[in-house]
Amino acid sequence: MKKLMDVGEFGFIKLISRLFLKKTGKPKIISGIGDDTAVIPFNRDNFLLLTTDMLLEDVHFKRSHPPYDIGHKALAVSISDIAAMGGIPRYALISVGLPKKLSLSFAKKIFEGIRRTARDYGIEVVGGDTNCSRKIVIASFVAGTVRKNNLVLRSRAKEGDYIFVTGTLGGAADKGKHLKFAPRLPEAQYLAGNFKLNSMIDISDGLLADLGHILSTSRAGALLWQDNIPLASKRENGIEKAYYAGEDFELLFTVPKRLAKKLLKSWPEKFKTKLSCIGQIKSGNFGLKAEDKNGVRKKLKAGGFRHF
Amino acid sequence: MKKLMDVGEFGFIKLISRLFLKKTGKPKIISGIGDDTAVIPFNRDNFLLLTTDMLLEDVHFKRSHPPYDIGHKALAVSISDIAAMGGIPRYALISVGLPKKLSLSFAKKIFEGIRRTARDYGIEVVGGDTNCSRKIVIASFVAGTVRKNNLVLRSRAKEGDYIFVTGTLGGAADKGKHLKFAPRLPEAQYLAGNFKLNSMIDISDGLLADLGHILSTSRAGALLWQDNIPLASKRENGIEKAYYAGEDFELLFTVPKRLAKKLLKSWPEKFKTKLSCIGQIKSGNFGLKAEDKNGVRKKLKAGGFRHF
């Protein structure tokens, strides 16, 4: 009997996506399953963005982690998704499963973490559901809006686009950044408001996996300039971690070549996070390759963290 | 050290609610935490409704239940919430945690159940999140709309209102109805569109618990006519089950006395589910009482199913 692990997470997602795309006919939505958020008609100037993420104890966090950070992360992952569409998060709902013997103080601190992050990012927490479970599980739902002009999908990368990434990659697990990361909302707002981005995604599954999502939905290839990739660690396997480790929650995006220089020059210092130009979009049959400083190219496989 | 079970589910919800109401200041929302769904400004004629529910293996369902029914229920509970506001469900997102050794066929059938229910109720499934977990967990998030004129809150019951309920109560656990129930969306649409309802809620925690939510938010009391309560079972403890057992997902609502007769007379046969007038809203200091056919009154305690 086939098990979930036999098809893997992305295989299962593809399978479910087909199920829903096949049967509901032509969707009224602008973009549904297969981007960071769903994009839905809202009003004259804005689309509505809807996204959900689930955090599970012993998968995404441990009971020994600070409950405050767990609450933060539960909301921050969804904020990061909204940001990657060029949007602004507005409302959140939180469903939790909590062990009945969990200390009240731990449970409260999870919600205090959620509350502070909601406040910091201008979000109203408007509802939720509480249940009893053996392990802690938190599902966040965030509704946001995006000005129609600012909407950035992952599927519109164009041959010749330069590929950019914010911050550094591969250090999420080492430094506990995966719990404390700041969603790149101001950066994404600046980018989507001032530049014509062709595609954007947040890096949750790893650089190659998420670049892979851009490439497969855009039917494109890419050449990465390996030495331009901003590594969190200079150690031997730093580049491997940057390629394959998940949960950096940095922005990965592509812009027309003619805008690249202006973008780099005008990047506001206030963001503190740096901006790196790490490669170029190629045609679909180019595949995915990395070039080192000597001009030697090698093929890469788009892949990253899978839950099963 | 205080544990969650020491304050109980409703105690914990109250505590979280205060946390969010206290710190976010005056909300722009019409109604947030403390109703079946959040109610948010949308466009000239409609509000946006947002709701979330989480289903957990061994709490809400067992692995031995049909996966199709599990998927159905995951969405149906949220549809029921939207219906109870007088609204129409539009979009859904589903976050799941699934064991990696779960059979692919079981996992697919959960989603087929979700898909069919989505189709039956005119909902587009537009996104989700998949994760690995030890036990199955499904969080649904549904966004709907409600015509401003049709919005029904739980907090506007008025003294003198007659109290109505659809269907029969207390049979959910016995007959597996808790997995297969049909959310009362057509009934709620008919009611909200044709009558001025003062309050409505869906019965998920039990008649007395959910009536208790109406009474406490409306600062009202109620007298129940015990022999009018539609019991799922005529057995000895039928009335106890109707009072305290959860998951009936029937509609509980109140209307001004002058509309009661018209409502009962014009109730469309096509609904098949029956409509019962079970009592009257009283002033807050009346409390909650039940009267039997001999006119004997006894005090009731508003309570019902708690997760912890």
Image: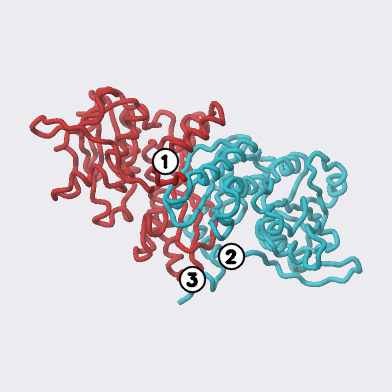
Chain colours: A cyan, B red
The image quadrant that residue A288 belongs to is bottom right
Helix, strand or loop for disc 3: loop
Give the residue type at disc 3.
Lys
Q: Number of labelled discs?
A: 3
Q: Are marks 1 and 2 in contact (CB under 8 Å)?
A: no
Q: In the drawing, does residue A264 fall left or right of residue A122?
A: right
Which residue is pictured at 52% across the width and 46% down the height?
Answer: A106
Q: Position of residue A299 (x, y in %)?
A: 78, 72
Provide the secondary structure element on which disc 1 rests.
strand
Direction from residue A282 to residue B264 in the image, left or right? left
Q: Residue B58's x, y, as percent?
A: 38, 59
Q: Which residue is mark 2?
A: A10
Amino acid type for the residue under numbered disc 1: Ile
Q: Find residue A144 and name its label.
A: none
Residue B247, position as x, y percentages in the image: 31, 48
Q: Position of residue B190 (x, y in %)?
A: 32, 37
Other-residue count near label 2 (Cα within 10 Å), few / some / many at <14 / 14–19 / ≥20: some
Could you say whether the residue bearing mark 2 is in a helix, strand or loop?
Answer: helix
Which quarter shows the N terminus of chain A? bottom left
Q: Are marks 3 and 1 in contact (CB under 8 Å)?
A: no
Please tell me which residue is depicted at 57% across the width and 38% down the height of the picture: A115
Q: Single out the mark in the foreground, 3 or 1.
A: 3
- For the residues marked 1 and 2, what is the alpha-carbon distance in whole angstroms? 32 Å
Check disc 1 and report the residue beneath it.
B88
| Residue annotated with mark 3 | B101
Please state the chain letter of the residue tagged with numbered disc 3 in the rendered image: B
Q: Nearer the viewer, residue A65 or A246?
A: A65
- Front residue of this view, candidates A35 and A51: A51
Type of residue at label 2? Phe
Q: Separation of disc 3 and disc 2 at Cα?
A: 16 Å
